[in-house]
């Protein structure tokens, strides 16, 4: 078990598309466990593999319900509905929150650690986190969801911040 450093804005791995996982072996199980630990340590409610530099299509989340931590392998969004605006943040863009408009409801099809096909469906926090993590696995970031003008301003701020870190 290990806690990984979380990659932040400017790291190209966050813009990379992850590769589907073929076959669930010990390396996938260990990765999932490490990702859950890293998520809780952050602390956050979701984490995608490329956020720790691993280009595989797997994410973990905990929607703060009675279900505890869950794993989604090769997730795809199969249904969305409604619209909802919500203040959203990201472990890879620490210290920033934006009002993001997304579908309110989402249904995701994925594979769990036992290799079974599973569906996760929900709105509110669960709906948000599912969409946010699938975006990551597709090389997306929450700022992509901002209206053009707001996005430009956000990008400028983030670039300046990254430079200061040097
Ligand atoms: Zn994120």
Image: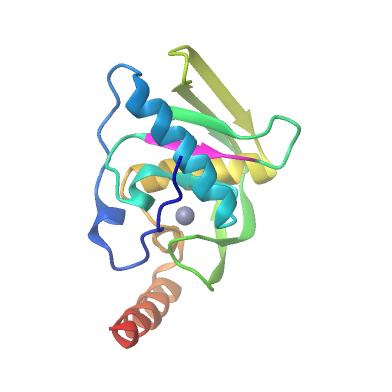
The image position of residue 56, as x and y in percent, is 30, 36
When the figure is inspected, residue 12 is found, relative to residue 60, above or below; the finding is: below
Residue most extreme to the front: 1
When the figure is inspected, residue 40 is found, relative to residue 160, above or below; the finding is: above
Residue at image location 50% in from the left, 49% down from the top: 38
Q: Is residue 48 left or right of residue 88?
A: left
When the figure is inspected, residue 37 is found, relative to residue 9, above or below; the finding is: above
When the figure is inspected, residue 157 is found, relative to residue 91, above or below; the finding is: below
Q: Is residue 93 left or right of residue 124?
A: left
Range shown magenta: 58-62
Q: Quadrant of the C terminus?
A: bottom left
Residue 8 among magenta residues: no
Q: Quadrant of residue 149?
A: bottom left
The image position of residue 153, as x and y in percent, is 40, 80
Q: Quadrant of residue 93?
A: bottom left
Residue at image location 61% in from the left, 47% down from the top: 83
Residue most extreme to the right: 66
Q: Quadrant of residue 152?
A: bottom left
Residue at image location 33% in from the left, 85% down from the top: 160
Can the viewer see residue 78 in this picture?
no
**Colour setting:** rainbow
The image position of residue 103, as x and y in percent, is 57, 44
Q: Main secondary structure of the magenta part?
A: strand
Residue at image location 67% in from the left, 33% down from the top: 68
Residue 60 among magenta residues: yes
Tell how many labels: 0
Can the viewer see residue 47 in this picture?
yes
Q: Is residue 87 left or right of residue 111?
A: right
The image position of residue 89, as x and y in percent, is 55, 62
């Amino acid at each position: 078990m290990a806690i990984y450093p979380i990659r932040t804005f400017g790291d190209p791995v966050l813009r990379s598309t992850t590769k589907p996982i073929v076959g669930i072996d010990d390396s996938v199980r260990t990765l999932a466990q490490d990702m859950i630990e890293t998520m809780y340590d952050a602390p956050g409610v979701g984490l995608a593999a490329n956020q720790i530099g691993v280009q595989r299509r797997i994410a973990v989340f905990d929607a703060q319900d009675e279900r505890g931590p869950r794993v989604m392998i090769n997730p795809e969004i199969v249904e969305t509905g409604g619209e909802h605006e919500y203040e959203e943040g990201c472990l890879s863009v620490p210290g920033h929150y934006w009002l993001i408009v997304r579908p309110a409801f989402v249904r995701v099809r994925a594979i769990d650690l036992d290799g079974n096909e599973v569906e996760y469906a929900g709105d509110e926090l669960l709906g948000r986190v599912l969409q946010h993590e699938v975006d990551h696995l597709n090389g997306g970031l929450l700022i992509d969801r901002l209206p053009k003008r707001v996005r430009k301003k956000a990008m400028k701020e983030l670039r300046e911040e990254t430079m200061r870190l040097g």
